[in-house]
Amino acid sequence: MIRTSCLQAVLMLTVGTLLLAACGGGSSQPTATPTSPPPTVTPFPTFAFVEPTKAPVFEQSGDEDAEDGESDDLAVELDPKLVGRGRGRFEALECGNCHGANGEGTDLGKSLLGFDLTEEDFVTFMRSGGELGTVHQFSTDRLSNSGSRNLYQYLLSIAQGG
């Protein structure tokens, strides 16, 4: 009987060892090799250069325009309320430091008395700064769209002598 139980124990031990080896539990080596994660792609931001707008040309009105007081290009009806608000923008942005208190011009800035831009060109210039760069570049947190319209009305009024 001892011999049978001994034989059974050896047989059980052999079967257990075979099962452990088959399941991978008996080896110290990993059965699957780990793979490294795929490389990540980091996109780099790219920026496009946008050519700044040209600086506006302010021309003094000559004797020809002095008769009618208004050029044909700027047939904009002035609203006194908007002109008043525009003067406030002119003062808040300290335009007078370079262009003079009444837009007459100084050594630092041109006269605005010959102002002849369209409203769209004026707003574009004030947003981009043109060739003057950041000196005349105002984002919407400093010069809103309505503030731009008001300032435009004020500049037209001083160009027309009002």
Image (spheres, rainbow, N blue to C red):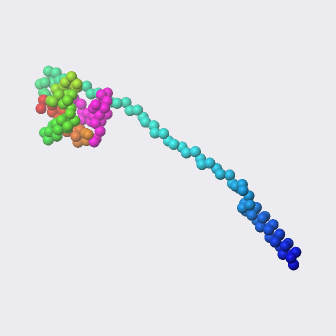
Q: How many marks?
A: 0
Q: Nearer the viewer, residue 75 or 161?
A: 161
- Magenta stretch contains residue 134: yes
Q: Is residue 64 left or right of residue 128?
A: left
Place residue 82 in its image quadrant: top left
Residue at position x 54%, y 43% in the image: 41
Q: Position of residue 74 (x, y in %)?
A: 20, 32
Q: Quadrant of the C terminus?
A: top left
Residue 25 picture quarter: bottom right
Outermost residue, bottom side: 1
The residue nearer to you, when weighing 63 against 100, is 100
Q: Position of residue 6 (x, y in %)?
A: 84, 73
Q: In this rendering, would 109 be left or right of 16?
A: left
Q: Residue furthest front?
A: 2
Q: Quadrant of the N terminus?
A: bottom right
Residue 1 higher or lower than 26, as above or below: below
Residue, far top: 63
Residue 161 visible in the picture: yes
Residue 3 falls inside the magenta stretch: no
Q: Which residue is drawn at 34% across and 30% down?
A: 52
- Does 24 appear above or below 116? below
Q: Is residue 79 visible?
A: no
Q: In this view, does 8 lie to the left or right of 43?
A: right
Q: Where is residue 55 in the image (x, y as percent from the top left)?
A: 29, 27
Residue 94: quadrant of the picture = top left
Instruction: Name which residue lies at 27% across and 27% down.
Output: 56
Q: Is the magenta stretch mostly helix, strand or loop?
A: helix
Residue drawn at x 78%, y 64% is 18
Task: Give the residues in magenta.
Answer: 114-141
**Image position of 106 with respect to 152: above or below:** above
Compare residues 106 and 113 and report the one nearer the observer: 106
